[in-house]
Amino acid sequence: MAESESGRPRILYSFPHTIGGPGIGTTAAHQVQELIAQHFEVYVYCTCSRVNLDGAIRVVQTLVVAGHRIPHRVLGVERAYRYHDQRVALAIPRLAGAVDLIHAWPAGCLRTFAAAAKDGIPSFREVPNPHTESAFEDAGAAARAVGITLPPTDPHRYTARRLSQENAEFEAADFLLLPSEYVRTSFTVRGYPADKLLRHRYGFDPVAFSEPDPSEQYATRPFTAIFVGRGEPRKGLHLALRAWLDSGVAERGQFIVCGSIMPDYRRVLAPMLGHPSIRELGFVTDVGTVLRSADVLVFPTVSEGSALVTYEAMASGCVPLVSDAAGACTRHMSDGLVHHVGDVGSLTNHLQLLAEDRALLARLRQGALSRRGELSWEEAASALGDAYRTGLARKGASF
């Protein structure tokens, strides 16, 4: 294995979606851009990119023809994933000796991993959610608890075919990249060997989520809580609203809901959403501004990989009140408050506590802001680089 000039591992980064798109597309964009900024040699294969990837050794957009993007739905989403996977797999023999590892995302990586194994290139599979079986179980239970059924298009609705495919991907990869201890636990309880599991983490964008003005007088505004995320049972908006109304803080504070809400779920939430203290903003493009206007992020999710909004809230001076399923970096009573998943009573108490004790709220806010430097995407890329090196060392290579 020839060493790169930078002394860092050389990466083939495969993403079968749009880099820079919403959700995981944002995560992938920050990973690639920061790896490039830290002088890793990166070969990017994606279906399409909406962001600047200057500095990459090569960028191949597998669903772009003559400068025009072909939407996944034109081929059929599953067929598009397979096509991307095949394109990357065919490229691997030509890149043997030029890359040291494959970093691939779900849905389009089985052929890629097979080709990598044939050429002796270690493979790393990103795991943005808990183990798929766990994610299916938790999402289904949350939906049943509020009396609705997840629609067929919901990515967390159980399908045997998808579970089988993801299990095959987990098995085929040499290493699994896990962004939180919550995700790691979902694998260890299912018997995955410790030496296959590598921790890294996600981050926040310091430009999009700037530090709040220190001169702002937080104590003069009504106590403000915020929920940011898709309105679906898995994210726990019903738990957040119940805790808010049970706490009594609703009589003097305000609760802001950011994100679209599933129609069936909205009907369940309607009696709570109608309370005068609750304000819906719908989908918000400038989340940073809204977070800086709030005192606490209420995020009682029942299943998560590592919610980006928890990083973003801390960086914005918005104290996280999160479940232990959020995959957050929050440290209880240091820079936020953590409750056990589903424990509405504890979340209710946490809201009461911070609404009444502004000194504690200020201390937790400062604790969160003091960690801005360590929670950035730049630091996340360093952690990812360390995970690469750990995996390669287990394969007998050193960097």
Image: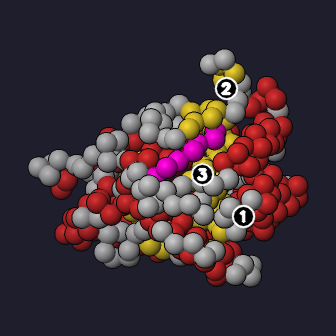
Q: Amino acid at mark 1?
A: Gly
Look at the numbered disc 2 and give the secondary structure of its residue: strand
The vertical placement of 343 against 93, above or below, is below
Q: Where residue 309 sits: x, y (%)?
A: 45, 53
Give the residue pinned by disc 2. 64
Look at the numbered disc 3 and give the secondary structure of its residue: loop
Q: Amino acid at mark 3?
A: Ala
Q: What is the quadrant of residue 337 in the picture?
A: bottom left
The tag earlier along the polypeptide, 3 or 1, is: 3
The vertical placement of 331 against 293, above or below, is below
The tag earlier along the polypeptide, 1 or 2, is: 2
Disc 3 to disc 2, how far (Cα)?
Answer: 24 Å
326 in magenta: no
* Residue beneath the point at 44% across and 55% down: 5
Q: Which residues are magenta?
A: 40-46
Disc 3 to disc 1, how far (Cα)?
Answer: 12 Å
Say which quadrant the N terminus sits in: bottom right
Give the residue pinned by disc 3. 98
